[in-house]
Image (cartoon, rainbow, N blue to C red):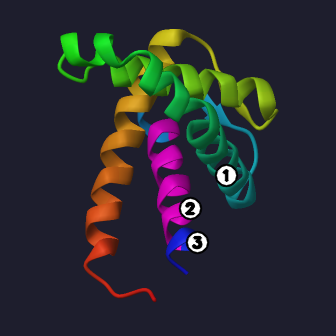
């Protein structure tokens, strides 16, 4: 149950990014947001973890700010996998990655207080 809640929170974060950042758009409805969130989570889990480990010195030198660039790159990769997501520039991906991180972090904190079994 917890993974479904986290997936929904990530879809909500992607929706917030598309609402706030010009240059990022999900074509379709709620199912497309869930689909993009699933692909982004899979890409971030598989490739993002490896990239974060490989760029650990840069992450340490920038006090973690380089993680935003890595997340933006994972978002750009998601656009190449899914036709439902369009990002017009890398700066849009940077700002979207910041919003997605903030909203999903807040959502994780709010949902972790509940016992989802």
Local crowd size for mark 3, using a 10 Å CA cut-off: few (<14), some (14–19), many (≥20): few
Circle 2 sits in a helix, a strand or a loop, which is it? helix
In magenta stretch: residue 9: yes
> Residue 92, how many percent across, how many down?
48, 18
Question: Is there a contact, CB below 8 Å, between mark 2 and mark 1?
Answer: yes
- Is residue 30 visible in the rendered image? The answer is yes
SS at mark 3?
A: helix
Task: Classify mark 2: residues with Cα within 10 Å, few (<14), some (14-19) or many (20+).
Answer: some
Assess whether mark 2 and mark 3 are in contact (beta carbons under 8 angstroms): yes
The stretch drawn in magenta includes residue 26? no
Whether residue 21 appears in this view of the structure is: no
How far, Cα to Cα, is label 3 from label 2? 5 Å
State the residue position of label 1: 38
Residue 81, given in percent of the width and then of the height, sits at 79, 30
The quadrant in which residue 65 appears is top left
Q: Please name the residue that numbered disc 2 is placed on.
A: 7
Return the disc, 2 or 1, that comes first in the chain's sequence. 2
| Disc on res. 4 | 3
- The percent coordinates of residue 8 (x first, y second) are 54, 64
Boundaries of the magenta span: 5-18
Image vertical order of residue 60 relative to residue 107, above or below: above
Label 1 crowd bin: few (<14), some (14–19), many (20+), radius 10 Å:
some
**Rendered view: 13 above or below 25:** below
Dominant secondary structure (helix, strand or loop) of the stretch shown in magenta: helix
SS for tag 1?
Answer: helix
């Amino acid at each position: 149950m917890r993974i479904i809640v986290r997936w929904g929170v990530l879809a909500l974060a992607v929706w917030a990014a598309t609402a706030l950042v010009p240059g990022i758009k999900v074509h379709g409805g709620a199912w497309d947001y869930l689909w993009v969130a699933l692909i982004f989570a899979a890409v971030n889990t598989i490739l993002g973890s490896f990239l974060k480990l490989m760029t650990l010195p840069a992450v340490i030198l920038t006090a973690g700010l380089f993680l935003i660039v890595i997340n933006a790159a994972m978002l750009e990769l998601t656009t190449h996998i899914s036709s439902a997501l369009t990002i017009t520039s890398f700066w849009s991906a940077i700002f979207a990655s910041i919003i997605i991180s903030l909203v999903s972090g807040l959502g994780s904190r709010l949902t972790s207080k509940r016992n989802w079994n």
